[in-house]
Image (cartoon, grey):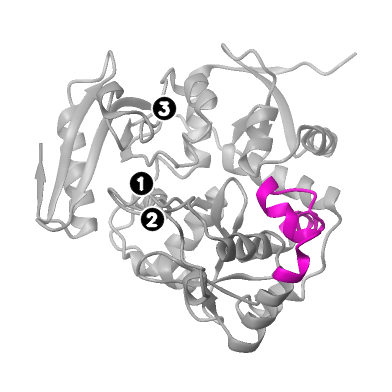
């Protein structure tokens, strides 16, 4: 007879998910490198995105959880000296900053890219018939040290983030394949590449490479820890794993007792509770969430947890946008109660609140608590005023 499946209310699932993501705890009065490290370890990665209308996306999850902090703490962790570095760049959910100890768990992905088995089709050609071009660029970096695409002839980007020139495409394949990594970022956020052994600490490089199956199981476990409670789709989406590998890993983690099958009120799919997940009696606090925050980046999960349909409208024509260009959900205690379209007017030192949309049933204290969070964000960004 199969074991009885525990049933959880939607409110309990929501509190579990929020606690797993670091919400509900008191923000420290002064944030240090340890606070930041523990936050990244909890969420496992910070997604990188090029949009800078408010702040670069990778800075925002720590602000949402910790409040005002010195962004150079994250810069040093990601792109500082080799001895001080605790993060590295690679493709995980998307382009991401990850704790260094995850590097061995992603070597299978690097090896697959090196063979030309994964990655964008436009880049796979450098694993095969155009391999000599990639080898030539790699040798130049080996001989000359850290280089960006713009350091090569014809290497400068052609029209922005995805308008890559030929050299940039070669460099990105080498990056996918783990042949090079990000040494630093320039003031325009251009990635500078170098050999991994000159960037990543020797202790990390010396760690054994797990089998792909072991690595994927470890990634699913980390995904489950970051989620607290999740469906199989949620678990594999966090590190963008294939369905078959995820199913195998989940089954093994269930058998080993790390994941506990549960049923969540209103969810059509089975769910899995990490055995170490906390189930707090209540969640208090407020936060503005970046569009790429791991709490909300999987939009179907956001709807299941919060009954909150969220879509980013950056690529929607202005006259067809419903809520605005760069809209941040507003978390109040354990509910998403509003949407705030924000822009940093750095020249005039103003935080522009272009539009606020409240959800039905938003509590009466929501505007006051949002105002406090906007003031904190303005202070964090070095802006003098909040303008609505």
Q: Main secondary structure of the magenta part?
A: helix
Viewer-nearest of discs 1 and 3: 3
Place of residue 314 in the rendered image (x, y in percent of width and height, measured from the top left): 36, 36
Q: Which residues are magenta?
A: 106-133
Question: Mark 1 sits on what residue?
Answer: 64
Disc 1 is placed on an element classified as helix
Q: Neighbour class for label 1 at 10 Å: few (<14), some, many (≥20)?
A: many
Place of residue 359 in the rendered image (x, y in percent of width and height, measured from the top left): 29, 18
Question: Mark 2 sits on what residue?
Answer: 59
* Residue located 54% across and 54% down the image: 96
Place of residue 22 in the rendered image (x, y in percent of width and height, measured from the top left): 46, 45
Disc 2 is placed on an element classified as helix
Q: Residue furthest bottom?
A: 143
Given residues 263 and 220, the one toward you in this image is 220
Q: Neighbour class for label 2 at 10 Å: few (<14), some, many (≥20)?
A: some
Disc 3 is placed on an element classified as loop
Question: Mark 3 sits on what residue?
Answer: 311
Q: Is residue 110 magenta?
A: yes
């Amino acid at each position: 007879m199969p074991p009885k499946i525990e049933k959880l209310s939607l409110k309990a699932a929501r509190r579990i998910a929020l606690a797993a993501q670091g919400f509900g705890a008191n923000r420290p009065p002064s944030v240090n490198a340890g606070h930041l490290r523990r936050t990244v370890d909890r969420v496992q990665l910070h997604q990188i995105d090029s949009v800078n209308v408010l702040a670069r996306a990778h800075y925002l999850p720590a602000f949402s959880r910790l409040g005002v902090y010195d962004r150079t703490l994250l810069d040093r962790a990601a792109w500082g000296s080799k001895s001080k570095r605790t993060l590295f760049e690679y493709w995980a959910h998307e382009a991401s900053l990850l704790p260094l100890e995850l590097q061995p768990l992603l070597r299978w992905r690097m090896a697959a890219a090196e063979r030309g088995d994964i990655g964008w089709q436009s880049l796979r050609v450098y694993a095969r018939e155009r391999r000599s071009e990639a080898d030539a660029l790699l040798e130049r970096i080996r001989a000359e040290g850290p280089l960006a695409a713009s350091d090569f002839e014809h290497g400068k980007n052609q029209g922005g983030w995805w308008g890559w020139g030929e050299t940039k495409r070669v460099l990105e394949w080498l990056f996918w394949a783990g042949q090079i990594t990000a040494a630093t970022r320039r003031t325009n956020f251009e990635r500078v590449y170098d050999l991994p052994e000159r960037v990543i600490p020797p202790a990390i490089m010396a760690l054994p490479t797990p089998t792909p199956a072991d690595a994927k199981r470890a990634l699913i476990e980390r995904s489950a820890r970051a989620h607290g409670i999740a469906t199989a789709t949620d678990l594999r989406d966090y590190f963008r794993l294939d369905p078959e590998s995820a199913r195998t890993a989940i089954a093994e983690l269930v058998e080993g007792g790390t994941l506990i099958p549960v049923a969540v009120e209103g969810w059509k799919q089975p769910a899995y509770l990490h055995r170490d997940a906390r189930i707090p009696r209540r969640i208090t606090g407020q936060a503005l969430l970046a569009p790429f925050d791991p709490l909300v980046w999987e939009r179907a999960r956001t709807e299941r947890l919060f009954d909150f349909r969220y879509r980013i409208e950056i690529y929607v024509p202005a006259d067809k946008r419903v809520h605005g260009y760069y809209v941040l959900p507003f978390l109040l205690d354990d509910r998403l109660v509003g949407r705030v379209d924000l822009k940093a007017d750095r020249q005039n030192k103003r935080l522009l609140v272009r539009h606020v949309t409240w959800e039905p049933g938003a509590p009466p204290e929501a505007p006051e608590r949002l105002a406090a969070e906007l003031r904190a964000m303005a202070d964090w960004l070095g802006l003098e005023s909040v303008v609505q």
